[in-house]
Amino acid sequence: MTHQIHIIGGGLAGSEAAWQLARAGVRVRLSEMRGVESTAAHQGDDFAELVCSNSFRSDDAERNAVGLLHAEMRALDSLIMAQAEIHKVPAGSALAVDRDGFSRGVTDALTAHPNIEVARERVDALPPPGGAPVIVATGPLTAARLAESIGAATGSDALAFFDAIAPIVHRDSIDMSIAWFQSRWNKGDGKDYINCPLDKEQYLAFHRGLIDGEKGEFKEWERDTPYFEGCMPIEVMAERGVETLRYGPMKPVGLDDPRTGRWPYAAVQLRQDNALGTLWNIVGFQTKLKHAEQVRLFRTIPGLENAEFARLGGLHRNTFINSPRLLDAQLRLKSAPHVRFAGQITGCEGYVESSAIGLIAARFAAAELAGRVLEPPPSTTAIGALLGHITGGADADSYQPMNVNFGLFPPLTERAKKADRKGMMTARARADLQQWIEATA
């Protein structure tokens, strides 16, 4: 099959981009190096592997920006959202998935499509102009040689930050005589999380253990790399103050310990990680602690004294480009417009955000191949607001990875009570997206 567009990278963004293009009748070559060469963070070779959490975060499309982005992607025939729906597991008001089933479903859909040619290969350089246009969706773990090629093409050094991985526990090793099922404030079906309670003495001892625990060494090139605030290692949070964790991943509010009928002093939550319910990840417990130290310290948590770990936490360096400076409004590299970028390498943060930028990059590319210009979605929509931030709304001099949030949206033109604003913004977004879909059909 002679391809019309080349996608480099089979993560969330690349998978979504390939699907969108193939569904538009475009012949795609999808290059993925896993299967030939692995990365520091991936475990397998399937497309759209979820490296960190198994959660796509809130699915509330009425009052939450990421939930709104879910809804917009569903309206735009997103493969990622369709497979997330098929493979979802209980997670209260959040959308979480069986990570293996999800990735396998994405892989099966892509490999079965007649317009997609899958190539298991490492691409070491940006293709030159003159051939098929390119979408680079290599994500935060771009291979070194390709990263060097991108740097040469952009005339700018790649930025970098750390991303951390939370540990996963076998369900049958959790002591349910101490832990209990409950969602915070009984959201969802009220029993979507396992909760482990800590009293004040236990919490302070755990906090001290995080401070004193042996951490992995940074390589020389990692030493000055900043953390992304949305994926902060738990020991870094602990260093910010003794109460920080109690207002973060260990907050006890809305959780009633059935043994006391009261909120504990602090709580550790675990969320289902696979459809069988045999694996549960410790929410917010990304860490740089050495593996032996993780096992020792996490087994001091009440209910996890005999925990068996399917995966321990880790930390890896992510890279991204300075998109507001380097990309145009259609995600094309200004210095080489035959190249588009999509996903986390653009500086968006989060599974859904990465997928959304892959989706819109593909739609831009499909329109261009058809001799049309696709106008970007309105900035009042979640996908439009995120795109606008990446391609010029953010300050290029201080650009950092960003999740979608209502702060990226233009303010309401009418006065509204604070309690009503989010609902009004999501209603406006839905109406404006529908108009854009109809206008660009």
Image (cartoon, rainbow, N blue to C red):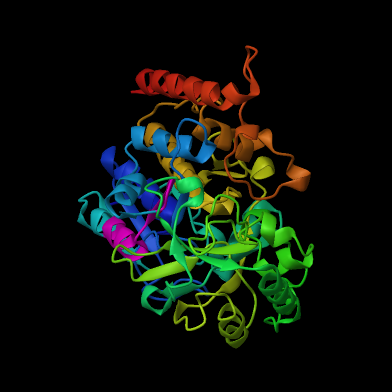
Q: In this view, does 60 lie above or below 371?
A: below
Tell which of 266 and 371 is nearer to you: 266
Task: Indicate yes or no whether the magenta region holds residue 251.
Answer: no
Is any part of residue 260 visible from this angle? yes
Q: In this view, does 260 lie above or below 325?
A: below
Looking at the image, which residue is at 46% across and 39% down?
A: 67
Q: Is residue 238 above or below residue 431?
A: below
Is any part of residue 228 visible from this angle? no
Looking at the image, which residue is at 71% across and 73% down?
A: 201
Q: Give the range drawn in magenta.
A: 91-107
Task: Tell whether 177 sits left or right of 274.
Answer: right
Q: Which residue lies furthest to the top in this view?
A: 414
Tell which of 133 and 189 is nearer to you: 189
Task: Tell whether 277 sits left or right of 286.
Answer: left
Tell which of 410 and 427 is nearer to you: 427
x, y percent for residue 164: 59, 67
x, y percent for residue 435: 41, 18
Tell which of 16 and 150 is nearer to you: 16
x, y percent for residue 63: 51, 32
Quadrant, the C terminus: top left
Q: Is residue 407 above or below residue 134?
A: above
Quadrant, the N terminus: bottom left
Task: Indicate yes or no whether the magenta region holds residue 94.
Answer: yes
x, y percent for residue 248: 65, 56
